[in-house]
Amino acid sequence: MKYRNPVITGFYPDPSICRVGEDFYLVNSTFEFFPAVPIMHSRDLVHWKQIGHCITRDSQLTLHKDAAGQNGTGIFAPTIRYHEGIFYMIVTNVGAGDGTGNFYIWTKDPAGEWSDPVFLDAPGIDPSLFFDEDGRVYYTGTNDTKIYLQELDLKAGKLLGKPKEIWGGSGGAYAEGPHLYRKDGWYYLLISEGGTERCHMLTMARSKNVEGPYDPCPHNPVMTNRSLGLPIESVGHADLVQDQHGRWWAVCLGTRPLGYPPRHNLGRETMLLPVDWSGEWPVFGDHGRVLEEFEVEALPDGRSGQCTAEGQCSGPDFFEDDFQAGKPDFSWNYLYNPDKDLFEYRKEGLCLHGNENCLKDADSIAWIGRRQQHHVSETCVTLTFPASLEGEEAGLTVYMNCRHHYEAALCCENQKRKLIFRRQIGSLEKVECEVEDIPASVRLKLTSDKEFYIFSYQTRDGSWKELGRGEVQYLTTEVGGRFTGNYIALYAGGNGRPCREEAVFSDFVYSGRS
């Protein structure tokens, strides 16, 4: 049967996976967005459904704000493991001060509440857990481009002994993302090298002793798409899993770049590839390459026909929200830890109470967004906002970070309500279109393709009129970001003082097809 990559589209990087019986669970990095660490469930590894988040409470941690506004703080590279009835998720919260560093949380129900964090006195990033056959638990991490190992007492929440450096990689930059596995009497160490851009690659080493020495695979890198001109690039940061039939698979991140030079706007996405581990070393994908389409004998659930169900990036995707559930759908995120007083669910829709912050502030604002998951997409939403106080505004934005975004908004300027289209590209900011004599309730539309984001509004006679457009290339990671992808978001703000008027959003619809 055939399936297509990515299996999880949009900003879902650094996947880690575990299996419990016939069920697979997967987590991803989330950086400055909250709730943090989405947890996905699947039976076949191709079709995934989000069942919750690992971090949902302010009491669990504080996401530190990125003063540079380039998506460089927050939750980096989680690992999920299951052992004796308990799920563990270990991760790094990058920032400054208390509540940052490496920690783990646990639960017996991955779709339920997870514990408060147990912080570890461990340097670096990208922590992982390994449960050995003798009952000992090991922590692996990255520090100063070296992979180190240390025994961990999970019950006491303490690392034991001294850390031991076990491998520095094959010579590529940024040896990181370590995962340990045991097979046929060997300990296999899988890491990423080359950075998370186009030189990304996986390398591997093994040892008979968990503390080493580790001998590198003679075929390193075991997986990379660098310099190959394939539709999927920057592949790496992988995790292995064995299904209930004994077959091996890997999940990894990758990007789908646009144009030349290559740039990507959807973020790093989750890919799936079969792994042949019939020999001493695993063979990933197509001789170490990650393809858009793989043909396999069957998926773990026994499916062997053509894989065309909704959820594959080759098929349609559709989401609508009338905001009547009283709480956000799992697909919605806030920026940083939200001020819950800024968000209110009513029968007429989602009400945002804008504070003094605006989109160009690296701070908590009345902002709620969903990942853009397709290059070609359409989003519609109705906004009701009187905009009667000077400076207040509310609207629909496509948002990479606080320094790179486009939006259509109702605002008040010179005591007049206007509909505007604005672009911010780094320090360059311009309102490129203004429409006066606009009603307090307006239907907005954002369409995207591989070249432009186009904003439109519905006129009184029901027709659509273009408000403005911006090039996709300026909202790409290579131009203005680091580790995330674009969000389509609803927002309100006072540009220096709180909004007096409430912004109500209703009838949100998103559809995408490639």
Image (cartoon, rainbow, N blue to C red):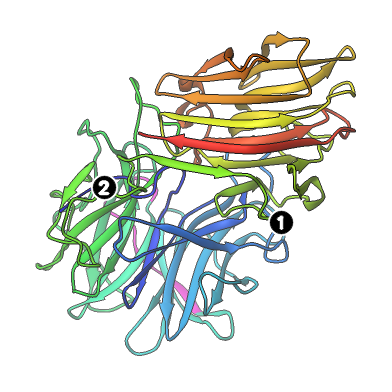
Quarter occupied by the C terminus: top left
Residue sitting nearer the eye, 125 or 18: 18
Please provide the residue range marked out in magenta.
161-174
Residue at 20% across, 44% down:
293
Residue 160 versus residue 116 in the image, above or below: below
| Front-most of residues 220 and 183 | 183
Residue 377 appears in the figure: yes
Quick one: which residue is furthest to the left in this view?
279
Residue 360 in sight in this render: no
**Residue holding disc 2:** 308
402 vs 276: above or below: above
What residue is pinned by disc 1? 97
Verify whether residue 164 appears in magenta.
yes
Earlier sequence position, callout 2 versus callout 1? 1
**Labels in figure, total:** 2
Q: Position of residue 263 (x, y in %)?
A: 39, 27
In the displayed structure, does residue 132 sit left or right of residue 402?
A: left
Q: Is residue 399 above or below residue 90?
A: above
- CB within 8 Å, label 2 to label 1: no
Q: Quadrant of residue 22?
A: bottom left
Instruction: Give, as a three-letter code, the residue at label 1.
Output: Gly
